[in-house]
């Protein structure tokens, strides 16, 4: 079944990147989680283009039986939806593109990371541009255009005192609603059902396209476990003991969930690149709405059981900034920092050798000690450190040490 149409029309900020790619590249591949709005966006951008979805069993069988013949029977410009189901099409696509390199010939969409699939042995290098479409960012949901990430890396953050009160509103609602278009605006009970059915569909239908899994229930238990562990260091030994699964299975299942864009591993930062390779990554759930549903958290729990939002809040911020990088500066690299003294920075952003840090606090007040992680990162990065932000629930933008660091209201992620 193709992705459901969005009930509300959202302006997707990656549309410009897709249009630019179509103008100079024969194959444009739009990758992102199922139900993130890929099909809707492509059909809106290219309403007259021939569209084929491999969620249709008949078309799937035909493409698998004779990949080259199937493609030759299609119009010259075509969209192929859920391409990860038919990796056999990639070599003949290469053949056809080499015969005719007209820009925009093929638009591919995939709900799994095509380049990480074990069955894919053709990368279409030099012929394909990959565009990542995340679930809706809070900027896109709110219809704003001023990116906090752009403000941060351009050095334009400034101190400002607000007159609107002492506590930012709407953070819990933003976290719990997540970024999948379909459940937005549904009543709470209906949205919870949607998330359960979504996870069932991904595990039952999409996993088979990326790997063989003997016990789907074990994979489901791991997803729930990772929701509880979101924003923590990935401890495979602990997961193995807690779930009764061996380390090899845990690592394999996490790789599957990454290919399906349900979780991400955020590597560790160190000024010595080799040391990064032996440092533990953090694990993050990609969509905070799905994670909140698995944790059974609602916006009302923000004040009653706020500490349970700690990791979820951090994962939410990481996702928002990675989303914004897609239309601000796609060459940014993201990691986290933690040293032997347990000083840490939730998100390290790199552009070339330049470094920024972002910390996340749930509280509406800040203390001098809250910026110790940023100070340690600044000392490690030296002259390459450009500044940072401590996102918190207060409404004032206040200067911090080290220089070019500020405490910033968390709603600057989505409000202008």
Image (tube, grey):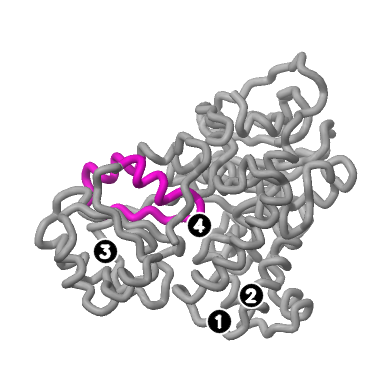
- Disc 1/disc 4 C-alpha distance (Å): 19 Å
Identify the residue at image location x=75%, y=24%: 395
Identify the residue at image location x=54%, y=41%: 384
Graded by Cα atoms within 10 Å as few (under 14), some (14 to 19) or many (20 or more), the crowding at tag 3 reads: some
Q: Which label is found at residue 33?
A: 4
Q: Quick check: is 21 in the magenta stretch?
A: yes
Q: Between tags 3 and 4, which lies in front?
A: 4
Question: Residue 182: percent from the left, percent from the top?
Answer: 56, 48
Residue placed under numbered mark 1 in the picture = 213
- Going from N to C along the chain, the mark reached first, 1 or 3, is 3
Q: Quadrant of the N terminus?
A: bottom left
Identify the residue at image location x=76%, y=17%: 164
Question: Residue 60: percent from the left, percent from the top?
Answer: 33, 71
Question: Residue 127: percent from the left, percent from the top?
Answer: 23, 57
Q: Which label is found at residue 124?
A: 3
Q: Residue furthest right?
A: 304
Question: Are the residues tagged 3 and 4 within 8 Å (C-beta)?
Answer: no
Residue placed under numbered mark 2 in the picture = 219
Secondary structure of the residue carrying tag 3 is: loop
Q: Which label is found at residue 114?
A: none
- Going from N to C along the chain, the mark reached first, 1 or 2, is 1
Q: Between tags 1 and 3, which lies in front?
A: 1
Quadrant in the rendering for residue 126:
bottom left
């Amino acid at each position: 079944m193709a992705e459901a149409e969005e009930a509300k029309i959202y302006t997707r900020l990656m549309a410009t990147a897709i249009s630019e790619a179509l103008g100079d590249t024969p194959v444009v591949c739009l990758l992102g989680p199922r139900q993130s709005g890929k099909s809707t966006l492509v059909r809106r951008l290219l309403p007259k283009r021939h569209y084929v979805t491999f969620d249709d069993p008949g078309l799937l069988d035909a493409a698998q039986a004779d990949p080259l013949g199937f493609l030759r029977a299609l119009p010259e410009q075509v969209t192929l939806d859920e391409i990860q189901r038919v990796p056999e099409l990639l070599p003949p696509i290469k053949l056809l593109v080499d015969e005719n390199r007209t820009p925009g010939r093929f638009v591919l969409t995939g709900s799994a990371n095509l380049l990480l699939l074990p069955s894919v042995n053709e990368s279409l290098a030099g012929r394909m541009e990959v565009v990542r479409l995340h679930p809706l960012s809070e900027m896109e949901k709110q219809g704003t255009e001023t990116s906090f990430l752009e403000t941060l890396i351009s050095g334009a953050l400034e101190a400002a005192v607000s007159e609107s009160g002492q506590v930012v509103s709407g953070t819990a609602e933003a976290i719990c609603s997540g970024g999948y278009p379909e459940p937005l605006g549904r009543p709470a009970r209906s949205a919870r059902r949607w998330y359960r059915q979504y996870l069932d569909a991904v595990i039952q239908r999409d996993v088979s396209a990326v790997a063989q899994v003997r016990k789907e229930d074990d994979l489901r238990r791991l997803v729930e476990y990772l929701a509880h562990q979101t924003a923590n260091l990935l401890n495979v030994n602990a997961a193995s003991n807690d779930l009764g699964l061996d380390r090899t299975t845990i690592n394999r299942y996490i790789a599957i969930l990454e290919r399906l864009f349900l979780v991400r591993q955020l590597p560790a930062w160190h000024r010595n690149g080799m040391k990064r390779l032996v440092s533990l990554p953090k694990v993050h759930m990609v969509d905070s709405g799905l994670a909140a549903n698995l944790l059974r958290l609602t916006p009302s729990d923000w004040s009653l059981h706020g500490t349970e939002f700690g990791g979820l809040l951090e994962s939410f911020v990481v996702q928002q900034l990675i989303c914004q990088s897609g239309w601000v500066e796609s060459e940014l690299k993201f990691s986290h920092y933690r040293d032997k003294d347990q000083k840490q920075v939730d998100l390290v952003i790199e552009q070339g050798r330049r470094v920024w840090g972002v910390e996340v606090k749930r509280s509406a007040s800040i203390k001098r000690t809250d910026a110790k992680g940023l100070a340690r990162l600044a000392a490690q990065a030296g002259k390459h450190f450009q500044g940072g932000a401590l996102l918190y629930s207060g409404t004032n933008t206040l200067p911090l040490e080290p220089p070019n660091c500020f405490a910033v209201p968390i709603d600057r992620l989505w409000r202008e």
